[in-house]
Image: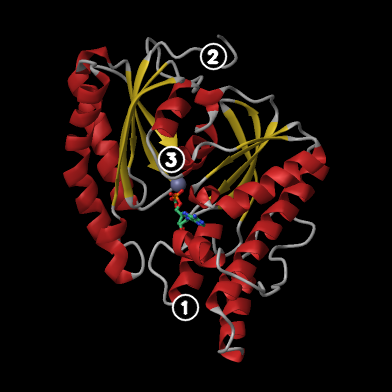
């Protein structure tokens, strides 16, 4: 079963062809980061227009690289929520038009569920699992009952984890998106600043805005402090906040596996912190490779493959079947 995945919810345009939810035949991502760089954040109108320009060439490139004819596509899937509404509409319209032209079914996919499906091509985890999504727009915890059942347990009450990286980077005069430059700067830290662990006590919800404010006040109060020490302290606090939240979730839902996804998982410090966390608790942590942690379309195609409610005749198999 060959699924074409389309992702256009924010500032990456992506198209991928995945066979049987496992074999990645082609995966193309066009980042718009440079386009939005001068504005310090994503400009929705510009994002939509760029998606419109990029989708057709990316689609053609996927066919070319995979060596598959368009007629081999069994199902077309696109992210339809959540995200920038104009950008989502461009991807969905493209997908629906393509599906109509090919006379194949179309499936609308949830972006967060897609992030948590990104690792499935490497092997399915033991279910039920906890699912952590930390991206530019979301910080959420799910109970993943099977590859097709995602129950939202908690989410951020203010800024998302990636958003707070982007905002802190901005006040530190670092470029957008803020995660990578903060991570690089933090490598030079000598005495990381200690910031309080962010979060909401005894809750599955996240909160990162207090940490953001703490970093801003610290910079004002300690202009002499090395930027690298602030960056490292901030990054460590985010990682502690996330690990602490997973601890709380695990105490409520004692599962054996934790799935992860979202652009913030590209952060190596966070990855290693979470690996240590998992080892200490006898839990298996599933972290997709970096290119599948960031926004991509493989995850959309994989999510569609496991959708039990896939339209009749689409060939989607129920989860768990080999
Ligand atoms: O999942 P994603 O690609 O797009 C959304 O769905 O939002 O995540 C983008 C977010 C941005 O906020 C970016 O700053 C953050 O992921 N990010 C990072 C790193 N690379 C990207 N955050 C921390 N460390 C990184 N290395
Ligand atoms: Zn994302």
Residue 29 in the image: x percent, y percent?
A: 31, 41
For the residues labelled 3 and 1, say whether their Cβ atoms are less than 8 Å apart.
no
Contact check, label 2 and label 1, Cβ < 8 Å: no
Q: Quadrant of residue 175?
A: bottom left
Residue 177 drawn above or below residue 152: below
The quadrant where residue 64 appears: top left
Q: Nearer the observer, disc 3 or disc 1? A: 3
Q: Mark number for residue 318? A: 2
Ligand 1 within 8 Å, label 3 CB? no
Quarter the C terminus occupies: top right
Residue 242 or residue 173, whichever sits in front: 173
The residue at which mark 1 appears reads as: 171
Residue at 60%, 63% (x, y): give it: 235
Q: Which residue is mark 3?
A: 291
Mark 2, secondary structure of its residue: loop
Q: Is residue 147 left or right of residue 68?
A: right
Q: Secondary structure at mark 3?
A: helix
Query: Looking at the picture, does residue 118 appear above or below residue 35?
Result: above
Earlier sequence position, callout 2 versus callout 1: 1
Q: Nearer the viewer, residue 251 or 310?
A: 251
Image coordinates for residue 140, horizontal then vertical, percent: 60, 49
Q: Secondary structure at mark 1?
A: helix
Nearer to us: label 2 or label 3: 3
Q: Position of residue 250 (x, y in %)?
A: 78, 42
Residue drawn 31% across and 39% down? Answer: 14
Residue 163 in sight from this viewpoint: no
Instruction: Write the residue at 81% across / 40% down.
Output: 281
| Left or right of 51 on screen, residue 117 | right
Q: Is residue 168 above or below residue 179?
A: below
Q: Is residue 32 visible?
A: yes
């Amino acid at each position: 079963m060959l699924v074409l995945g389309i992702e256009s919810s924010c500032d990456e345009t992506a198209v991928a062809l995945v066979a049987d939810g496992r074999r990645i035949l082609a995966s193309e991502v066009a980042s718009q980061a440079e386009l939005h760089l001068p504005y310090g954040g994503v400009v929705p109108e510009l994002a939509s227009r760029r998606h419109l320009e990029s989708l057709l060439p990316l689609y053609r490139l996927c066919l070319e690289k995979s060596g598959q004819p368009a007629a081999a596509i069994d199902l077309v899937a696109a992210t339809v929520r959540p995200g920038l509404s104009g950008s989502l509409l461009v991807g969905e319209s493209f997908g629906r038009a393509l599906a109509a032209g090919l006379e194949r079914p179309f499936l609308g996919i949830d972006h967060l569920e897609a992030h948590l499906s990104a690792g499935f091509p490497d092997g399915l985890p033991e279910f039920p699992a906890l699912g952590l999504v930390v991206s530019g727009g979301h910080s959420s915890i799910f109970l993943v009952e099977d590859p097709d059942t995602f129950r939202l347990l908690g989410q951020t009450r203010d800024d998302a984890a990636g958003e707070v990286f982007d905002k802190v980077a901005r006040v530190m005069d670092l470029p957008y998106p803020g995660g990578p430059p903060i991570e690089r700067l933090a490598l030079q830290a000598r005495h990381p600043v200690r910031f309080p662990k962010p979060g909401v006590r005894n809750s599955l919800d996240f909160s990162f805005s207090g940490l953001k404010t703490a970093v801003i006040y610290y910079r004002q109060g300690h202009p002499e402090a090395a930027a690298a020490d602030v960056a490292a302290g901030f990054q460590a606090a985010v990682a502690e906040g996330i690990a602490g939240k997973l601890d709380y979730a695990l105490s409520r839902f004692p599962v054996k596996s934790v799935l992860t996804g979202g652009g913030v998982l590209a952060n190596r410090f966070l990855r290693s912190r979470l690996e240590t966390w998992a080892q200490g608790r006898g839990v298996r942590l599933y972290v997709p490779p970096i290119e599948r942690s960031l926004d991509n379309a493989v995850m959309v195609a994989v999510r569609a493959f496991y959708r039990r409610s896939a339209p009749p005749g689409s060939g989607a198999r129920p989860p768990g079947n080999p």
